[in-house]
Amino acid sequence: MLGQPLKFFVVFFVVVEPVSLIPLFTGLTTGATSQYKRRMALRAVSVAAAILVLFALGGASFLKLMGISLEAFRIFGGLLLFLLALEMVFARESGSRTSSSEAAESRRRADISVFPLAFPFIAGPGALATILLWFGPVHLSDQPTLFGAYLLAVVMVLAIALVMMLLADPLMRVIGVTGANVASRLLGVILGALAVQFVLDGLRQAFATS
């Protein structure tokens, strides 16, 4: 019972990658007051939480309504996470999170909480795919304990992301850009292996039901 939520926590933590929020948040809030930084961090996490919970509760029903099997989404989700892992390993700007034009727009915005912090950096495509992959097979009415354990893991990762943003300035002085990149690459290797496992599981289940 503990194994699945723990595994989900690791996967979701790697996908959200709270460490990467440190240089991002520092860059977007340079010169801002501590009150503004705290307000943006809290609002970003709140919006991201609302998006993720919405997907956790209704994502599987939406896939069923669209006629998309969970196996198909598992394969696509695995491929998406694999691309994200490659970007993390090679320390490239994540095209799966935001484009160059979106990044430029974010630097001009006074309110950065919803865009780009909540979406696409915290509750981005990779995080949403992970939510659907793990919450999809779990029915709230049949497995409330497991569903609650997954939600608790989401809350814990979001809490870590909030702490990272609130302490971004002192943490940036300690680890620096190089330290953040090293951590990102190590997490990328783990995510890549997990992404391949998602694809293999999806293919196995698809062939088993065909």
Image (cartoon, rainbow, N blue to C red):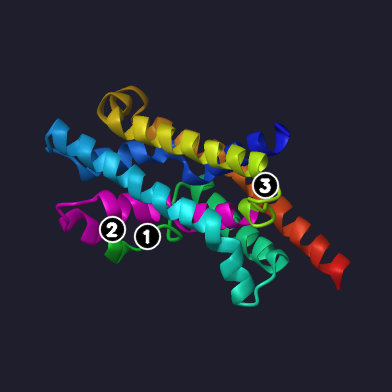
Instruction: Residue 191: give x, y in percent of width and height.
Output: 60, 45
Q: Residue 98 carries which label?
A: 1
Residue 26 sits above or below residue 55 on the image: above
Residue in the foreground of this view, choosing between 91 and 74: 74
The residue tagged 3 is 194
At x 40%, y 36%, the residue is 161
How many discs mark residues in the rendered view? 3
At x 62%, y 52%, the residue is 135
At x 35%, y 43%, the residue is 45
The residue tagged 2 is 103
Is residue 119 within the magenta segment? yes
Disc 3 and disc 1 in contact, CB within 8 angstroms: no
How far is disc 3 from disc 1 in space, using C-alphas? 23 Å
Report the predominant secondary structure element of the magenta stretch.
helix
Name the quarter where the C terminus is drawn: bottom right
Residue type, label 2: Ala
Left-right relation of 114 to 204: left
Callout 1: SS: loop
Among numbered discs 3 and 1, the one appearing first in the sequence: 1
Disc 2 and disc 3 in contact, CB within 8 angstroms: no
Callout 2: SS: helix
Residue in the foreground of this view, choosing between 144 and 164: 144
Instruction: Residue 1: give x, y in percent of width and height.
Output: 73, 34
How many residues crowd mark 1 within 10 Å: few (<14), some (14–19), many (20+)?
A: some
At x 31%, y 62%, the residue is 100
Residue type, label 1: Thr
Left-right relation of 207 to 199: right
Residue type, label 3: Leu
Q: In which image quadrant can residue 80 be found?
A: bottom right
Q: Which mark is residue 131?
A: none
Disc 2 and disc 1 in contact, CB within 8 angstroms: yes
